[in-house]
Amino acid sequence: MPFLDENEWAEISPLLQGSIESIKNYRSEHNCDLKTAKENDKSEAMLKFEELTGMKGIHSEIIYHHRLSDWGQECPKCQHLLRTSKAKYCANCGWQVEQNEKL
């Protein structure tokens, strides 16, 4: 799943704020439950994410978690992203930051 850099995030962030309203409108127009609306609504944020990344059908709730700056740097051992900028170890491979070492 691709992550969004700050320029991409600046484009999509305002659209994410409207995604809840989009779901409400879908429910109202189609007289359906929340689950159905989430599965079928194509918010502007989802369409912009598809345009930026090529990935279709990624719901806005998931997009919120794919801002690159919210994650740490790549692990020098396995190249997975560390969970935060202050992470002390890699959750993927177990690599640990030495006390004197900075990423």
Image: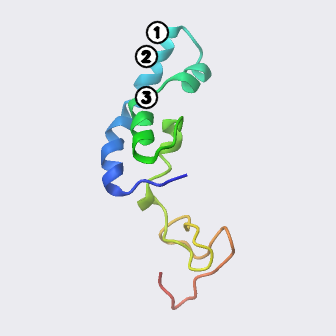
- Whether residue 68 is situated above or below residue 63 in the rendered picture: below
Secondary structure category for the residue under label 3? loop
Q: Nearer the viewer, residue 69 or 76?
A: 76
**Distance in Å between CA atoms under marks 2 and 3:** 10 Å
* Mark linked to residue 43: 3
| Residue at 43% in and 41% down | 49
Crowding at label 1, few (<14), some or many (≥20) Cα neighbours within 10 Å? few
Q: Nearer the viewer, residue 75 or 55?
A: 55
Q: Secondary structure at mark 1?
A: helix
Instruction: Examine the image and state in which quarter residue 15 appears.
Output: top left
N-terminal of the pair, mark 1 or mark 3, is 1
Give the number of marks: 3
Under mark 1, the amino acid is Glu
Disc 3: CA contacts within 10 A as few (<14), some (14-19) or many (>=20): many
Residue on which the image places disc 1: 29
Q: Going by the picture, which residue comes out furthest to the front?
A: 54
Residue 25, which numbered label?
Answer: 2
* Depth check, front residue: 51 or 36: 51
- Indicate which disc residue 65 carries: none
Which sits earlier in the primary sequence, circle 2 or circle 3? Answer: 2
Mark 2 and mark 1: Cα distance apart in space: 6 Å
